[in-house]
Image: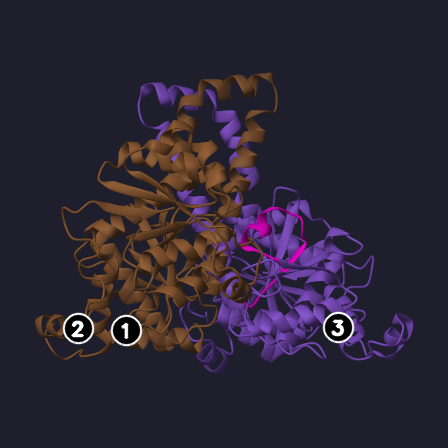
Chain colours: A purple, B brown
Amino acid sequence: MGGDHGPDIVVPAAVEFLDKAKDTLLILVGREERLRPLLGDKARHPRLSLHSASQEVGMDEPPSKALRSKKDSSMRVALDLVKQGRAHACVSAGNTGALMATARFVLKTLPHVDRPAIMTAVPAVNGRTHMLDLGANVDCTAEQLYQFAVMGSELVRAVDGLQAPRVGLLNIGEEEIKGNEQVRQAHELLSRSSLNFVGYVEGDDIYLGDVDVVVCDGFVGNIALKTSEGVARLLAHRLKAHFNQNLLTRLSGLMALPVLRAFRKEVDPRRYNGASLLGLRGIVVKSHGGADVLAFENAIHIARKEIQSNIPERIEHEVAAHFVVPHLNLSSVVAESADPLSGTAAAGQQQRAIA
Amino acid sequence: MGGDHGPDIVVPAAVEFLDKAKDTLLILVGREERLRPLLGDKARHPRLSLHSASQEVGMDEPPSKALRSKKDSSMRVALDLVKQGRAHACVSAGNTGALMATARFVLKTLPHVDRPAIMTAVPAVNGRTHMLDLGANVDCTAEQLYQFAVMGSELVRAVDGLQAPRVGLLNIGEEEIKGNEQVRQAHELLSRSSLNFVGYVEGDDIYLGDVDVVVCDGFVGNIALKTSEGVARLLAHRLKAHFNQNLLTRLSGLMALPVLRAFRKEVDPRRYNGASLLGLRGIVVKSHGGADVLAFENAIHIARKEIQSNIPERIEHEVAAHFVVPHLNLSSVVAESADPLSGTAAAGQQQRAIA
């Protein structure tokens, strides 16, 4: 089990999760001798099982090396279980690059998807905003940005229940003259698509909530997300320092403690932990490497929601509708498109997620 | 006068500035009939003069159009005054694209500088961080990123008085395997340079302050900056909402008011308003279009500091040292390099800035 803390975080998060999600089975993949002591008598939990894996992928290990030489890593074994239909989703706090490369290799991408993308939700003044790609794809073509938009829009439709999520394209100016070549071309494609495309949005729009899906390449998305974390940390640090200045300010901080706690809880990034790898023939959720128990548990809940919503299947249909036969009506598209995942998450059936 | 508010902001900011900076003359460029009523009896201020310009550049006007058809815009006339040596700096809240295009056309870039860059300072946990480019250059070569690093480092040396500013290259991973082609090549160039290059930094490092200059292309830099504004606004909005929830929380907010005010003042983005256009044969400072009086005044103070530090001259020398004769020692470089700006800001002489 990867991440900065491995089983020490994943095991208690799994136990917490099982208490809340009574319809889900969990398979913990890793070294049994590490997992059993952490589980204690929870090891006999009826909805929990262990699956052995003898290796781990290092957080700084090059993806290609992990793929080649770590065939019994917890990451690889968990993805193999999804591939074999023995699990419906994989949740990992491990090395992002290795997870993406291994997931692509094991699960394969959906038909007509060039490259999978990583998506997450962030809080906004009005509701929340989803953003992709967050680092899987450094350079993207206009067509790939369009694919991200389709996948992201479909996930938001499924998970947040919005009829027509508003899709924005991240750019440096709202005027159509700005931006780089790929972004301008993507604007063209999206304008002509059936998506609810609202045009260009800028960095500050991400946190306004006037758009549901923000599309960008992985380089820009990753930097926007990390920058956001940095700003939030700076502001928290400064606010704390101001309240700690002297006895009087400390006292006023004490008075304001319930408010400050409620505020902190609301904007807690752990509540948004869990990024979805979209465009694969299976569900994979990436937890932040430094996630704690609450944060990792949140990532498992995201995987569960995606199982319930049949995300890969829905995305496959949607991508086909946009990229294969855009001029046929939807019913004929559905009839034509093969569905390798049908049955993996049939309604009413007990569902599984793997940590 | 451009910006979202024009002379209504610029005029009072100029008056405030003159009260504080007794060594500086200001020339207000714009429609006299608009400026005089706003100035009142300050129009007779001994260190203030008016210079007429009959046009304005619209905030959404394409730069090429502004350049072609607005030859008597306040922006163009102010830059002409700098070009003619009648002023030492131009401060504008106008259309960024038009300002950059007009400044390049009127002032020209320094020798060996491919493209000017826009730089600003942001607050950090430790001190402050400078960042460039912020939107002047959407796609950048590795060589251009290296030039930005040289210019940014020299500005920080001059203005913040640091001997060897730590320069970081913005990327999506600290490992050397990540990032796009240009960024990887720029890493090579910077590693071999005489700059104090600390390697790759990520988005969250911008606000830590373990690096003095963060280098990136304008697309990424602009999005990082705007995203930061968005996060800060979201957090302020949520914090306020929590304190406004009910009578009790309002009361605790009242108790905490001095602390909250001090905090707000410290992280006030207006205190960081004013982005420098680097690489030109003259000083140009861009104020945020939506700047208020305090923010615009701050931008004029930045221009004044750059005049005092002979920024264009220093950057010219430094760029020559890196890109022309990197193997000669500095004294011979200085002797060789022509200096079109010498004398424009001689010490002791009264200095000017144009708004």
Front position in the image: A71 or B283 = B283
**Residue B84 appearing in the image:** yes
Say which quarter of the image contains residue A5. Answer: bottom left
Q: For the residues tagged 2 and 3, is the chain the same? A: no
Judged by depth in the image, the label closer to the viewer, 3 or 1, is: 1
Secondary element at image label 3? helix
Q: Is residue A50 left or right of residue B24?
A: right
B104 in relation to B265, above or below: below
Question: Residue tagged by mark 3?
Answer: A319
> Badge 3: few (under 14), some or many (20 or more) residues near its Cα, within 10 Å?
many
Q: Position of residue B342 (x, y in %)?
A: 18, 61
B100 in relation to B325, above or below: above
User: Is there CB contact under 8 Å for labels 2 and 1?
Assistant: yes
Mark 3 residue type: Val
**In the rendered structure, does residue A186 fall within the stretch colored magenta?**
no
Question: Residue tagged by mark 2?
Answer: B337
Q: Which mark is residue A255?
A: none
User: Is there CB contact under 8 Å for labels 2 and 3?
Assistant: no
Say which quarter of the image contains residue A317. Answer: bottom right
Magenta stretch?
Answer: A201-217
Residue displayed at 46% across by 50% down: B53
Question: Residue tagged by mark 1?
Answer: B111
**Mark toward the start of the polypeptide (2 vs 1):** 1
Protein chain holding label 3? A
